[in-house]
Amino acid sequence: MKRSVPAVPVIQKCRGVRACMILAIPLSLLLGTFGPATATDGLLFAPPLSFATGNNPVAVAIGDLNGDGKPDLAVANAGYPSYNVSVLLGNGDGTLGPKTDYGTFAGPYSLAIGDLNGDGRPDLVVGEFYNFGVSVLLGNGDGSFGVTTAFHTGSGVQSVAIGDLNGDGKPDLATANDYDNAVSVLLGNGDGSFGGGTEFGTGSAAWSVAIGDLNGDGKPDLAVANAGSATVSVLLGNGDGRFGVKTDHDTGISPRSVAIGDLNGDGRPDLVVATSGSNTVSVLLGNGDGSFAPKTDYGTVGSSFSVAIGDLNGDAKPDLAVANSFSNTVAVLLGNGDGSFAPTDYVTGFGPWSVAIGDLNGDGKPDLATADFNSNTASVLLNISAAGCVPTPVTFDLSPNTLNLRSMGRWVTATLEPEPPASPADIDIASIRLNGSVPVDASAPTSIGDADSDGRPDLTVKFNRAAVGLAVAEGEAVPVTVSGKIGSGCFEATARIRVFRPHVTAPSAGSVLPGGSTTEVRWYTPADVQVQSVALLWSNDDGASWTVAARELPNNGSYLWRVPSASTEQARVAVVVAGPANARGRSGPEDQSGLEVSGVLGVSERFVIATPLGVGEPRLELALQGSVPNPSRNLSVSFTLPGAGSATLVAYDVSGREVSRREAGSLGAGRHVVTLGAPGRLAPGIYLVNLIQGERRLVTRAVVIR
C-alpha cells in the first residue's frame, strides 16, 4: 500500500532537482542546506570545488610551480581549439586562482612535472597525441613558462613519464605510443633538451607508462598499460636507457592507466591498472623479480580511466584513487594492507579522465584533483577525514534498490552490519550520512536485529526517500555511500542502486536558443502517474541551482517558454509536479514563491542559451568541440558553425578509412550536436572527426566503446 506523505513548500531555487522523486520534498532538501560535510560525517572527502580549465582537460598533475610552498595544478587540455596547458596557482587553502594557458601543439593528452634542465625550477612535459611527440615548457620559477619546444617520439602519444633511465643523473622521458604499440625512451641532455626517441615494443595500443624498479636491481624498469590487448607489459631496464623484451600480464578490458607501489607491505613493487572496459582496477602483486601474480580485480563504476596510489585515510596502508569518466566520480579504494581494497565513490565534475593526489590545503592530509573532460574543469576534493579515525569495515544495503517515478513510500531503508568485534550498538546514529549529506530521518524507527538472517546483528535506519532521490544520480548501478562514527572510529561503505527517470524531450541536447526568443518545452507523463498541474524550472549552471519560470501549468506535455537573456552553455529545464503551497489545508511555513513541489517529471539535456550580439561583441567562430561525451557508445559530435554555408563532418578510423560523412551546413549558425553513423553500429575504437567548411578543416579525436 502506498503511503501518503505530507507535502512541504519549496522556494524559488532548489538544488539537485534531477534527483527528485514523486514525493513531497522538504524545503531544506531541495535547497541542499544540509551544510558541508565535516570530519564527523565520516566521509574522507568533501564535495568537489570546480575551477575552469581549457577545452576537454584529460590530464592533471600537482606541483609547486611558483615556489611559494603552495601546491599548484597543471592541466592538459586536449580539445580544439585549446590544445594547451592550463596552470592554476594554488592559494594554499585548497582553492585555485584563474587559469593561465600555455600553448602546445596538437592533442596534449598527458603531462608530467619535473626539473628537466637542472635549474631547480619545475618544468612541464606534455605528451602530444597528434604531433607524434612531446612538448617541453621550461619554468621560470614564478608559475610562468617559456616557449614550447617539441621533440619527436612515436605515433599517438597517450602518456609521458619522467625518470633517470640511464643512470647519468639527468632526467629522461618515456612515452606510451598508442599507434605504434610501443614505448619511446628519450634520453635527456640535462638542459631541457632530449635526444631522439628509441622505441621498445609493448602490447597493442600502449596507453599509459610508469617508471619503477620492478626487479630490485637498482635499475629503472617500465610498466605499460595496453588498451588494445588487455595487458600490462613489463620491460626490465639494462640501466643504460635500453630495455629488454616485454613480458605481458593480463588485466581487465581496455586498461587506461598504470601505477606502481607496494600495495601489500612486503617491500616489493606491485602494479595497479585502471580498466575502462570492465569497470575495474586490476591489482598485480609483485614477486620482487620483475614478475607478477595473476590479477585480482576490484569493481568500480563508469569507465575507469586513471589511477593513483597514496595513503588517503592516514592508516599507513596504501589506498587507490580512480577516475571514473562515465559516472562522474572518483572511486576511493581503501587498502587493507594486504593488497586488497574496498571502494567508495565521490562525485567530481563531468567526465573525469585523470586523478592526482596531493595536499592542496596544507593540513597534512592528501587531497584529490581531477581533470574533468566534459565540464572543462579541474575538481578539487579536500580530505576531511578525522585525524586518527580508525576505519571499521561495515556491510551496507539499501531497500528498495530501484528508485523511479512509481517507487513510492516515505523512506528508504538501510541495513548496516559492522564486522565483529564491532557491534551495531556502537554506531552513532546521529553521525550517519548518506552521500555525505542526507541524515537518518529522526522521525523514523530504528532497530537492531538480524535483518539478513546471517547470524550477525544489523542496525536498520531509514532515510527520507525524497532526500535520497536528491542525493543520487541516474543510472543502472549508481553508487550510494554511507558513513559515520562507530565507537572510537569511523566507517564508510558503498551500495549500488538503480535510478530511473523520464526526460524532457525538448529543448534537445546541444541546441542553441537565442535569449529572448520563445521555444517549446515538451515532456511526457507516464500513464499511471496522475498529475494535474506542473511548474517549469530552468537552470543556467547545469542543474546546480534552479529558478521557477512558470507555475500552475496544465500537464498537457507542452509549454511555450520565453528564453531568458542569460548566455550560458549549461542550460537545462525541468518540469516538476507542483501546486499552491498549503493547498490541502496543512499548516506550515510559506515561502516567497508560494509553490509546493511534490516531485519531478523530467529534466532536459544540456543546451545553450545565446544572447543577441551587441556592438563589439565577438561573433560565432567555426569550432569543433568533439564527441559528447568522449568516450561514448555512439559518435555524437558537438560543433559550432559561424553561419550558413556548406559544411561537412567526416569520421575516419585509425587506418584512414572513411566510416561516416554528414552534411551539416544546413543547420545554420550556432552550436549543434549530431550523430555520425547509425547508433551502435560503429566498432569500438579511436576515430578522427573532421569538420570542413571552405578551406578550413578542424580535427578532433573520439573514442567509441561498448
Image: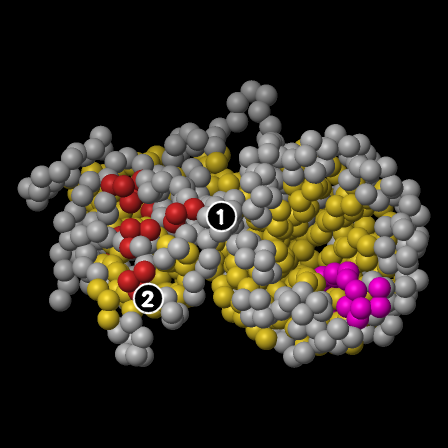
From the image, which quarter does the C terminus lie in? Answer: bottom right
- Region of the chain picked out in magenta, as a range: 204-218
Please identify the quarter of the rendering in which residue 68 is found. top right
Residue under the point 42% across and 29% down: 565
- Chosen colour scheme: secondary structure
Element under disc 2: loop
Residue 568 appears anywhere in the view: yes
Percent x, y of residue 34 = 33, 43
From the viewer's perspective, tell me whether residue 633 is left or right of residue 484.
Answer: right
Q: Residue furthest left?
A: 585
Q: In the figure, is residue 54 to the left or right of 239?
A: left
Answer few, some or many: residues within 10 Å of disc 1's Cα (few below 14, many 20 plus, some between 14 and 19).
Answer: few
User: Residue 377 or 310: which is nearer the viewer?
Assistant: 310
Position of 210 with respect to 10 (left or right) is: right
Few, some or many residues within 10 Å of mark 2 (<14, 14–19, 20+):
some
Type of amino acid at the residue the image marks with label 1:
Ala
Write down the residue under mark 2: 423
